[in-house]
Image (tube, rainbow, N blue to C red):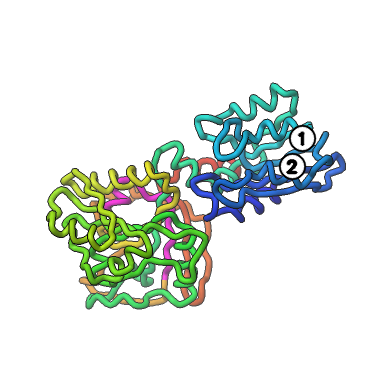
């Protein structure tokens, strides 16, 4: 199963909105006779690849797979039928598939065909790997990762507004790699006005993210780098009901997609935007700031994962902006707590990565497997 999980990780950033899945075929003596992973959206599933690699050696063998095999016709035929036809005697599955057309039916189909089915080995790792897929299927919204760079005293810029560069070159390279596997990147208009970002992965990754600006009054400058590149890299501007019609028309004429949320309340509108993105099957959403956007997302319980780059800087200054705005937690006991998954030194910076309250189901799964 460890090998199957390693194979599955090769598909991250390439298979969404499908889950990343890996599979291994074991002969009776424990030798690996076939293996595979879901390599691209619309391509063959991991089980089909592994069975094809095993060929005749699959008969009477064990299939080890990270996710319940599908039992419905999608872009590919049902994997359950391929497993049965190959003569597999035993299937070991790490985790079930929450997709409504599968959801236990795949395992039931295998058992009905006389195949021995074992569930659960390394379930926590498998569920964590497919957490974005699960969030989309169960909650109808993307997995939201909040990424920021801050000084050791929690500032994202100096009191004079200087923010380049808080993090080091190695951290910035890691961020570009992260962007390269995202479906969408979200920033607030304040960040755009302050930094004029491009929000692309350099070098390019396996995905080209939809760039999104939360901009209630359609203030995004037509001369910004985002708008100037809108015909080459998709850009969505999320505006509110009071956005001037002439500004919206100008953005659309420049090649931007404009989404108008009817909600006057910014927090409600942001929640509706995230739900809209889920309807478009966007699986991974990267939020890159600023303070107001992070605060609204966290207040609404919409942040699943955090990547915080902490630089060895002490900026100080009462006016220097902090990372997160919004209402905030009234008491320490009620503050969202990060379930830290990893702390890594990246050049001179530290990367703290973990799950917050919105990812509690995945955290609970990890605790069950501990």
Highlighted magenta segment, given as a residue range = 294-310
Camera-side residue of 284 and 336: 284
Camera-side residue of 170 and 72: 72
31 sits to left or right of 273? right
Q: Where is 187 relative to 357, above or below? A: below
> Residue at horizontal 58%, vertical 35%?
96
According to the image, label 1 marks what residue?
86
| Residue 323, x across and y down, in percent | 31, 63
According to the image, label 2 marks what residue?
51
Which quadrant does the N terminus fall into?
top right
Does residue 289 appear anywhere in the picture? yes
**Local secondary structure at mark 2:** helix
Label drawn at residue 176 = none
> Residue at horizontal 55%, vertical 36%?
74
**Local secondary structure at mark 1:** helix
Which quadrant does the C terminus fall into?
top right
């Amino acid at each position: 199963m460890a090998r199957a999980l390693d194979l599955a990780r090769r598909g991250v950033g390439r298979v969404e909105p499908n889950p990343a899945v890996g599979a291994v075929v074991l002969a009776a003596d424990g030798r690996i006779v076939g293996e595979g992973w879901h390599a691209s959206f619309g391509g063959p599933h991991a089980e089909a690849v592994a069975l094809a690699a095993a060929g005749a050696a699959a008969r009477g063998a064990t299939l080890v797979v990270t996710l319940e095999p599908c039992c419905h016709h999608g872009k590919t035929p049902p994997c359950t039928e391929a497993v049965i036809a190959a003569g597999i005697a035993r299937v070991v599955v790490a985790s079930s598939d929450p997709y409504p057309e599968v959801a236990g039916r795949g395992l039931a189909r295998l058992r009905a065909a006389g195949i021995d089915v074992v569930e659960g080995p390394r379930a926590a790792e498998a569920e964590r790997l497919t957490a974005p897929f699960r969030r989309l299927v169960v909650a109808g919204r993307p997995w939201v990762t909040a990424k920021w760079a801050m000084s050791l005293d929690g500032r994202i810029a100096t009191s004079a507004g200087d923010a380049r560069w808080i993090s080091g070159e190695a951290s910035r390279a890691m961020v570009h790699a992260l962007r390269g596997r995202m479906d969408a990147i979200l920033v607030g208009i304040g960040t755009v006005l302050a930094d004029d970002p491009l929000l692309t992965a350099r070098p390019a990754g396996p995905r080209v993210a939809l760039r999104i600006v939360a901009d209630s009054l359609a203030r995004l400058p037509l001369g910004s780098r985002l708008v100037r590149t809108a015909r080459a890299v998709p850009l969505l501007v999320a505006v509110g009901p009071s956005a001037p019609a002439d500004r919206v028309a100008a953005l659309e004429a420049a090649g931007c997609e404009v989404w108008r949320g009817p909600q006057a309340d910014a927090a409600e509108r942001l929640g509706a935007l995230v739900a809209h993105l889920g309807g478009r099957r966007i699986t991974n959403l990267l939020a890159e700031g600023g303070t107001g956007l992070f605060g609204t997302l966290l207040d609404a319980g919409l942040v699943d994962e955090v990547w915080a780059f902490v630089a060895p800087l002490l900026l100080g200054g009462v006016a220097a902006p902090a990372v997160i705005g919004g209402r905030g937690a009234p008491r320490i006991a009620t503050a969202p707590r990060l379930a830290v998954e990893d702390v890594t030194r990246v050049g001179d910076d530290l990367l703290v990565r973990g799950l917050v309250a919105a990812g509690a189901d995945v955290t609970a799964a990890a605790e069950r497997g501990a």
